[in-house]
Amino acid sequence: MAIEGAHLVQAAALLGAGLSMGLGAIGPGVGEGLVASKACEAIGKNPGEAGLLTRTMLVGQAVSESTGIYSLVIALLLLFVV
Amino acid sequence: MTIAIDTWIQVAAFTGGGLAMGFGAIGAAIGEGFTASEASIAISRNPKISGDIFKSMLVGQAIAESAAIFALVVAMILLFTDFTGQSVLTISVLMAAGLSMGLGAIGSGIGSGFPAGEACAGMSRQPAMSGQLTTNMLIGSAVCQTPAIFSLVVSFILIYSNFSGQPVSPTWAAILGAGFAAGFGAIGSGLGGGLVAQTSCEGIARQPTSAGTVTNIMLLGQAVTQTTAIYGLLIAFILLFKGFAPTESLGAAMALLGAGLCMGLGAIGPGIGEGATARSAVRWIARNKEATAELTRIMLVGQAVSESTGIYSLVVALILIFVI
């Protein structure tokens, strides 16, 4: 079987898509967990501010999520556009 | 010089055996070391019950050890079974079996050490709760071991299934991908489950009246933490049993390998993150029982957000398998 350049590029794009999303999911998963962990601690210490703390947690997690979304976008670009 | 297929099969069996035991030894050793270090501090704090603490340390370490024993069993099977004379796919099967079990034992080994150490520390503070602490430790550690058992199951399926009817390309990549999905996928959930079980032991020792609630919330938190390992198992099963049409395309093979790596690596982060969330929730439910409802709600919301990247990985893996 002769492997041509175009096949090699396509194979690299597909493997790259998997690696992009897989590795890219590690950071946000851990980071968002840490945010929620501290939010639980804060609510445990001061249950009266639960509403405010939930809002802060969700905004913080949303920012932390952004790199996961970048990875998803790059994975989808590698799959369907490149 | 041409090398016969049987030679490559032997090379793969020995390499797979080495990888299984090498990776598989990492987790249990760290976990057991943590247990023994906590037990030493506990004995210095309360030398009168050193016998009980010592016993609890050994029981906890034995559970953490089981992940490494799974790896040892798989390594022994790979070393001493005669695989020669089988199809060329066996090369990929044996490497995948070793990787799945070796990588899969890391998280469960580390994770199981945490509750065992904390149970020893708790016994030195609150000797009256020894029985309750041991029970809680055993339940928590047992849940930590499930991801390693998923990896063991995938390894056994790989070793004992007959893939000879399948086309070599792209099945070789699907098999390797299944090994990575089950192996990497187990790391996060094993470690995260241990973080949850650790603070539940701490909570029972600090606040004995909270024992029932703490064990329940621990199990809820651990269940959510396990989900990403289950995604990894799901992708591994799809890759093993779907059956792929023969193709010479390198792209089709890389898509399947990529799907396995995507789901496996993608499961690590959410598993650890969700464990960290439930760890704090359980710790503060023990200290502040009135806030149980509030804390359970925020724990589940926080875990759901943390899960999102794991779901992205699942989606990309499914696209790689079914759409490309």
Image (spheres, coloured by chain):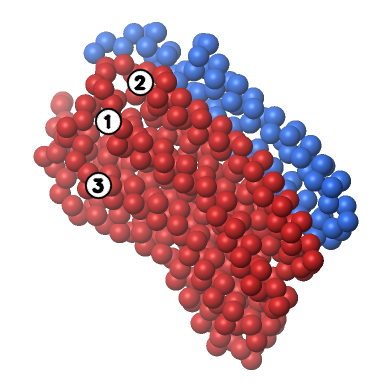
Name the residue at the front extreme: B293
Q: Which residue is mark 3?
A: B159
Q: Position of residue B171 (x, y in %)?
A: 28, 29
> In which quadrant is the C terminus of chain B drawn?
top left
Q: Position of residue B59 (x, y in %)?
A: 48, 76
Q: Residue at x 66, y 68 (%)?
A: B213
Q: Return the chain for callout 2.
A: B
Residue B252 tag number: 2
Rendered blue, the chain in question is: A
Disc 2 element: helix
In space, the residues marked 1 and 2 are separated at their CA atoms by 13 Å
Q: Are tags 3 and 2 found on a single chain? A: yes
Residue B243 tag number: 1
Q: Position of residue B112 (x, y in %)?
A: 52, 63
Hue used for the chain lettered B? red
Left or right of residue B272: residue B71:
left
Can you say whether B61 is above or below B302 in the image? below
Q: Nearer the viewer, residue B8 or B274?
A: B274
Q: Return the chain for callout 3.
A: B
Q: Are tags 3 and 1 found on a single chain? A: yes
Q: Nearer the viewer, residue B13 or A50?
A: A50
Q: Residue at x 52, y 68 (%)?
A: B139
In space, the residues marked 3 and 1 are separated at their CA atoms by 17 Å
